[in-house]
Image (cartoon, rainbow, N blue to C red):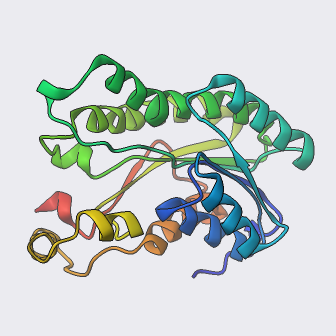
Amino acid sequence: MSNIPELKGRCVVITGGANGIGAAIVRAFYAQGAAVFFSDCDAKAGEALRKELGEDARFTKVDLRREKEICRWIADIGARAGGIDVLVNNAATDRRCTLDKQTADDWDEMFALNLRAYFLTCREATPLMPRRGASVINLSSLTFHTAPIDMSAYVATKGGIIGFTRSLARELGPRRIRVNTVSPGWVMTERQLRQFLTPAVKRMVKRVQCIPELIQPDEIAEVVLFLASDASRAITGQEILVDRGWAHS
């Protein structure tokens, strides 16, 4: 993992931090000496990660579909830390369903977690960010570019994140707050390995990527660290694809 000294002591807020990519991001910022506040709906996994890391990682169970819970969580962080330097919106659900089986409630729930929650965390956290500079990092997905047939609601939310990022970057730029999107390719989280990675799929992924190795969660975390660091101070409103070149195939 990269060593980025200026991240030491900074207040970092991460949603969906108990598992997968989110947990890798939590660990990455914790390793830098940041004060990490992370949330998840999976209380068991969140508490386990908090115990693994120690007192500088603070976990709160938050249902990101509920506005009041988000507002309470962010306000508590502001009161305890005195401000927020980095916000990482990572939480998402990617339930797969074809259009003919998609209900309006399913669609609304997907948007509530994958897009509406990003708006709410940004609305609550950015007033607590210092004018000397801060960073918002929103996680989108390669699927916005590849558009798989059974994930229309998910793809729509991920496209919305990219649009939201671009507009918010212009709005918050005068306050020296940078807003960027990281769009991972197919990352080998525990869930992906357990549910979806078959030998045939593995061969397909290696064939369509420019670089054949499978992507690991800590590789996404490295890009997030860069966008939180002072080295990216001239970068805002951008989408960074971390997909080993899949989108170019």
User: Does residue 61 appear anywhere in the picture?
Assistant: yes
What residue appears at the point 55 percent right and 32 percent down from the top-left corner? 117
Q: Judge left or right: residue 247 versus residue 79.
A: left
Q: Quadrant of the N terminus?
A: bottom right
In the image as oriented, which residue stretches furthest toward the front?
44
In the image as oriented, which residue stretches furthest toward the top?
104
User: Does residue 32 appear anywhere in the picture?
Assistant: no
Give the total of numbered labels.
0
What residue appears at the point 21 percent right and 34 percent down from the top-left corner? 152
Q: Is residue 37 above or below residue 230?
A: above
Q: Is residue 144 above or below residue 119?
A: below
Looking at the image, which is closer to me, 31 or 174?
31
Q: Quadrant of residue 98?
A: top left
Looking at the image, which is closer to me, 63 or 173?
63
Residue 229 percent coordinates (x, y): 64, 63
Residue 62 percent coordinates (x, y): 66, 40
What residue appears at the point 77 percent right and 66 percent down from the top-left corner? 34
